[in-house]
Image: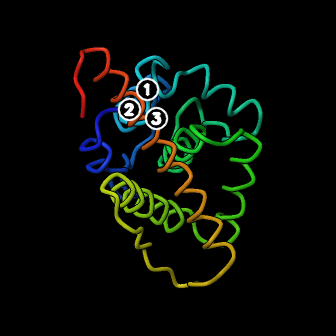
């Protein structure tokens, strides 16, 4: 993770911002690593590799590409998987995504995920109460599940970043 300002300024590309053309594996990997660089700790390397994507497809977490090409749906799914895997196991991620997809169309579910993640990151990193993105299904257990899932990711990102910054500052002899 980068510093707090990077986390508070994180932008998760919305559905309409994702390429509306099919991409080959190397293009997908490059694009996703660009989008997700702020969720990748330096010691972990890249957020995603072609091997990871192949494994997600092999285990049914992501649908197979069509003629070796990935579309907008694949990209959105892979972004969510990469972000959630910072906290959750793959079987949990599959269940969480399935719950959301059972309730909402993919573009709507994905855009809500992005907006809620940005909201949580900003609030948590600036030490403010989280004001969730409004939902048509306010008070629904599914909305609460989605919000709590995203908050878990945001809190984990914040804690990892704070520890990394603390270690960096104590290594250089600085005290905050």
Under circle 1, the secondary element is loop
> Which mark, residue 150?
none
Q: Position of residue 155 (x, y in %)?
A: 49, 49
Q: Position of residue 27 (x, y in %)?
A: 41, 27
Under circle 2, the secondary element is loop
How much space separates mark 1 and mark 3, taking CA atoms? 9 Å
Residue to which mark 1 is pinned = 41
* Discs 3, 2 touching: Cβ within 8 Å: yes
Which of the pair 15/95 is nearer the observer? 95
Residue at 71% across, 41% down: 61
Which of the pair 31/64 is nearer the observer? 31
Which of the pair 97/69 is nearer the observer? 97
Is 16 situated above or below 50? Answer: below
> Which mark, residue 1?
2
* Discs 1, 3 touching: Cβ within 8 Å: yes
Mark closest to the chain's N terminus, 1 or 2: 2
Label 3 CA crowd tier, 10 Å (few <14, some 14–19, many 20+): some
- 44 sits to left or right of 56: left
């Amino acid at each position: 993770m980068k510093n707090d300002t990077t986390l508070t300024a994180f932008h998760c590309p919305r559905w309409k911002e994702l390429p509306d053309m099919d991409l080959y594996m190397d293009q997908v990997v490059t694009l996703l690593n660009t989008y997700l660089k702020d969720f990748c700790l330096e010691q972990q390397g890249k957020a995603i590799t072609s091997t990871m994507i192949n494994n997600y497809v092999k285990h049914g977490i992501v649908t197979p590409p069509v003629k070796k090409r990935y579309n907008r749906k694949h990209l959105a799914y892979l972004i969510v998987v990469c972000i959630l895997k910072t906290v959750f196991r793959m079987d949990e991620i599959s269940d969480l995504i399935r719950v959301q997809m059972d309730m909402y169309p993919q573009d709507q579910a994905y855009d809500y995920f992005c907006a809620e993640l940005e909201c949580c990151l900003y609030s948590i990193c600036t030490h403010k109460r989280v004001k969730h993105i409004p939902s048509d299904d306010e008070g629904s257990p599914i909305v609460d599940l989605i919000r709590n899932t995203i908050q878990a990711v945001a809190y984990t990102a914040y804690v990892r970043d704070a520890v990394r910054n603390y270690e960096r500052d104590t290594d250089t002899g600085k005290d905050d």
